Amino acid sequence: MFYDRTKIYVKAGDGGSGAVSFRREKYVPFGGPNGGDGGRGGNIILEADEGLRTLVDFRYRRHYKAGRGEHGQGKGMHGKGAEDLVLRLPAGTLVKDADTEEVLADLTKHGQRVVIAQGGRGGRGNARFISNQNKAPTVAEKGEPGEERWLLLELKLLADVGLVGFPNVGKSTLISKVSAARPKIANYHFTTLSPNLGVVEVEDESFVMADIPGIIEGAHTGAGLGHEFLRHIERTRLLLHIIDISGSEGRDPLEDFQVINRELKQYSQALAERPMVVVPNKIDLDNAERNLARLQDFIQDKYEIFPISAVTGEGIRELLFRIIQILPQVPAIEFSANPDQHRLVQAQSDERFYISQENGIYIIKGREVEKHAAMAYLDTHDGLMRFQNILKVMGVDDALREEGIKDGDKVLIGDLEMEWIEGG
């Protein structure tokens, strides 16, 4: 089964904690600070791999976590940084933030990489906090938490040629004739419910052809499997519009041609302007010659027409040779997102923190203040005083007083719970 969309959770590694340590020398029972820094947490990196075709592996494993950095140690020994976790995705995968739907990455080229979640920096050891006022600091930092987020992965096929048309017009038969792809073929609508890729070789040339599931009228609104189908042809360089020229399904070939073009235009103007070759199929059946003449009169010189019979092979060789002549003239499709949509950019708030109350507890939220809380070293008086000073400088103390906080009230910052003591 072909999967083209899935949702995964990624968590970069936390940084290692800095160490509180002092030199131990003979006759110097309490020497200078020598606590080392923690190591950096591993990043989560996404890499495009042209050898992958589906997102199926990410359907069965949805959680990915990078390793944390090693903690610092005494004698000035710094912790080792963790290795990055590289997730390989098919080329053509669009990556979005699951909460905001902001486009984070568009992996279009083999080997393209993007850091999607940054590992936390290592905490500083107490050797970093020595000063003229404090020659023996007993304070360090815990490692910074790594970034975490839910991602939406959406695969759009990267193919040179895409076959479009109504269901059951012969697209699957054609791709099975010209490539090693073996799609399921039967005489009923929506035979192909997922795209099939095939590599077509013509003498010394080759190209990738995608058999796109059939489009129906109203597809641009999501009717049938419309959005699922149209999504896959956004990056095809050349469209082959396959038409049942015999009208064997009881439809008018000219009307079919206009309906499909209208659906493409209403879904994406850029897609409607993509180079197209019209391929009347089933030329060996009754009524084909009469309908072909009508189609030629209607299209005139707007599109090239190559009549074929996917079953008998008639006209296929001529079509393939024309395709390899056209493709070098068509540039590769590269864009950051759907060309008809603006990229969503999230406005960053200027607020360093905000306070809410729940069940009598004062909850302080904000990326900066939560990071300080997570990295706070509260095992010593120095560490506690440093953290309290950070909150005071940020304005948290004054904000809590304005909210009416009283002695004994609970304060929650991330996973850290504290008790308010005025003047403490």
Image: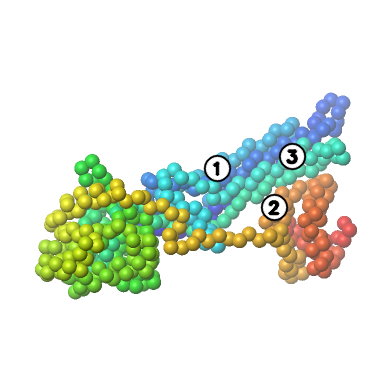
Which sits earlier in the primary sequence, circle 1 or circle 2? 1
Give the x, y percent position of residue 84: 55, 42
* Residue at image mark 3: 125
Q: CA distance from mark 3 to mark 1?
A: 23 Å
**Residue 415: in sight, yes or no?**
no
The residue sitting at 70% across, 61% down in the picture is 351
Q: Position of residue 31 (x, y in %)?
A: 83, 31
Q: Secondary structure at mark 3?
A: loop
Rendered image quadrant of residue 110: top left
How crowded pointer 2 is (Cα within 10 Å; few <14, some 14-19, many 20+) is rated as some
- Residue at 46% x, 45% y is 112
Is 380 placed left or right of 318 in the picture? right
Q: Say what amino acid the circle numbered 3 marks.
A: Gly
Residue at x-position 24% and y-position 72%: 255
Disc 1: which residue: 84
Which of the pair 134/336 is nearer the observer? 336
- Residue at numbered disc 2: 371
Q: Are marks 1 and 2 in contact (CB under 8 Å)?
A: no
Depth order, front residue of 86/294 = 294
At which x and y percent is residue 116?
54, 50
